[in-house]
């Protein structure tokens, strides 16, 4: 685990996070954790450093959950559930064929289907995917 000063004070085993950590998708059992002061700060941090693929909020505040789901510009937005559900099979699309975080995903001749993008909002009560 890598973290900011607040996280390091909570657990001495946490290594300091670098600026690069906030922009890195490790594809490994590495987690970079930052504590923010507000929902505004969290949304701004995600906008700056996120991949726009999957983001989650863990909260008991229904207003914060609705605002997060509305304002976070990601392909999948979760409320109280793990982002590990972001998978073609889990969404009923069959096997995973590819992942795009682009807003306009087609090249060449385009019709209405190619100009349509999706944003999934998933609400849970603490589900995780093992």
Image (spheres, rainbow, N blue to C red):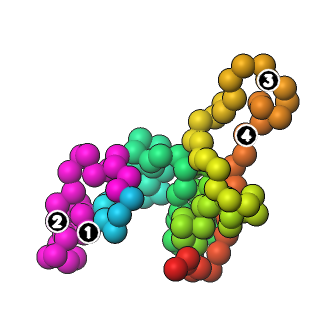
Determine whether the residue tagged by mark 1 lies in a helix, strand or loop.
Answer: loop
Assign the N terminus to one quadrant of the image.
bottom left
Distance from disc 4 to disc 3, alpha carbons, whole Å, reads 13 Å
Query: Which residue matches tag 1?
Result: 1
Frontmost of labels 1 and 3 is 3
Q: Earlier in the sequence, mark 1 or mark 3?
A: 1
Query: Which residue matches tag 2?
Result: 15
Distance from disc 1 to disc 3, alpha carbons, whole Å, reads 44 Å
Q: Position of residue 55 (x, y in %)?
A: 53, 57
Q: Earlier in the sequence, mark 4 or mark 3?
A: 3
Q: Is residue 23 visible?
A: yes
Q: Earlier in the sequence, mark 2 or mark 4?
A: 2
Residue for point 34% across, 68% down? 29
On residue 117, the disc is: 4
Query: Which residue matches tag 3?
Result: 110
Residue for point 34% across, 46% down? 23
Answer left or right for 18 relative to 123.
left
Front residue of this view, candidates 11 and 82: 82
Distance from disc 2 to disc 1, alpha carbons, whole Å, reads 6 Å
Frontmost of labels 4 and 3 is 3
Q: Position of residue 98 (x, y in %)?
A: 61, 47
Do callouts 2 and 1 mark residues in contact (Cβ within 8 Å)?
Answer: yes
Q: Earlier in the sequence, mark 2 or mark 1?
A: 1
Distance from disc 1 to disc 4, alpha carbons, whole Å, reads 34 Å
């Amino acid at each position: 685990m890598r973290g900011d000063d607040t996280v390091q004070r909570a657990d001495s085993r946490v290594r300091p996070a670098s600026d690069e950590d906030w922009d890195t998708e490790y594809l490994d059992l590495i987690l970079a954790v930052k504590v923010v002061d507000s929902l505004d700060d969290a949304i701004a941090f995600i906008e700056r450093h996120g991949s726009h693929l999957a983001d989650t909020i863990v909260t008991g505040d229904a207003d914060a959950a609705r605002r997060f789901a509305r304002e976070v510009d990601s392909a999948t937005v979760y409320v109280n559930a793990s982002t590990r559900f972001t998978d073609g099979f889990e969404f009923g699309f069959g096997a995973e064929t590819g992942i795009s975080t682009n807003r306009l995903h087609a090249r060449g001749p385009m019709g209405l289907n190619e100009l349509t993008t999706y944003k999934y909002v998933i609400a849970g009560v603490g589900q995780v995917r093992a």
